[in-house]
Amino acid sequence: MDASHTPPVPPADAAAPAPPAGRHGPWGDAGSGVRVSRARRLAVPLVTLAGVVGAFAYVGSVDPNEPGHYPVCPLLRLTGVLCPGCGGLRSAHAFAHGDLVTAFGANALAVLGYLAFAAFTAVWLVRAGQGRPAPRIALKPAWWWLLGAAALAFSVVRNLPVGSALAP
């Protein structure tokens, strides 16, 4: 057998190759083979959570029920129509104080959004701690249209006499 056809042999003291970067490992960018620390993996979800907690703390301490603290909804001011977000600050204020009944009364759609964000963030933190990638919200366009239609329906119903319980 000719020596030019034999595969090269790595030296005995060569380090073992890093496992391939995949969807379920504590590794950096695909193919980099660089291990990422747990603190670094948790940094982005924790900073995001800190920002949201800070925003809720601010809204919880500066009462939106008192005039002059926050701007008025432009759609409400110009047309008198409640948008899907109207009452969201009052809802966040009540939510920050643990008053879920008042929070739902101010804006039920916002409270559902707060709870969905909390669930998403919890999953994100657990996955980051395990070295897995962040969860993805990969909805088909039909689902986005359905969510938009639900927000529109919420807005229309809360502006009708029959849906006055949904108005802030």
Image (cartoon, rainbow, N blue to C red):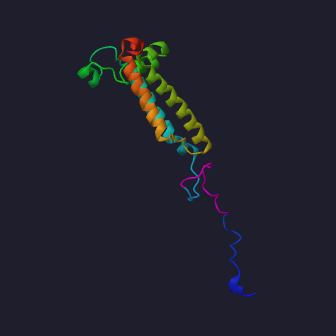
- Rendered view: 156 above or below 12: above
Span shown in magenta: 16-29
For this orientation, the residue located farthest to the left is 78
Residue 93 within the magenta-colored segment of the rendering: no
In the rendered image, the vertical position of residue 81 relative to residue 142, given as above or below: above
Looking at the image, which residue is at 42% across and 25% down? 56
Between 122 and 34, the one lying in front of the other is 122
Farthest residue toward the right?
1
Number of marks in the rendered image: 0
In the displayed structure, 61 sits above or below 126; it is above
Q: Nearer the viewer, residue 133 or 130?
A: 133
| Magenta segment main secondary structure | loop
> Percent x, y for residue 24?
62, 48
Percent coordinates x, y for residue 108 in the rendering: 45, 20
State the image quarter where residue 106 is shown: top left
The answer to which of 2 and 13 lies nearer the viewer is 2
**Left or right: residue 2 compared with residue 97:** right
Specify the farthest residue to the bottom.
2
- Tell me which corner region of the image, top left, top right, bottom left or bottom right, holds residue 165: top left
| Horizontal side, residue 43 vs residue 78: left or right | right
x%, y% of residue 63?
Answer: 36, 16
Q: Residue at x 56, y 50 (%)?
A: 36
Residue 20 magenta-highlighted:
yes
Write the residue at 28% across / 24% down.
75
Q: Quadrant of the N terminus?
A: bottom right
Q: Percent x, y for residue 112?
A: 49, 24
Q: Quadrant of the C terminus?
A: top left
Q: Is residue 126 left or right of residue 62?
A: right
Q: Which residue appears at 67% of the width and 63% of the height?
A: 16
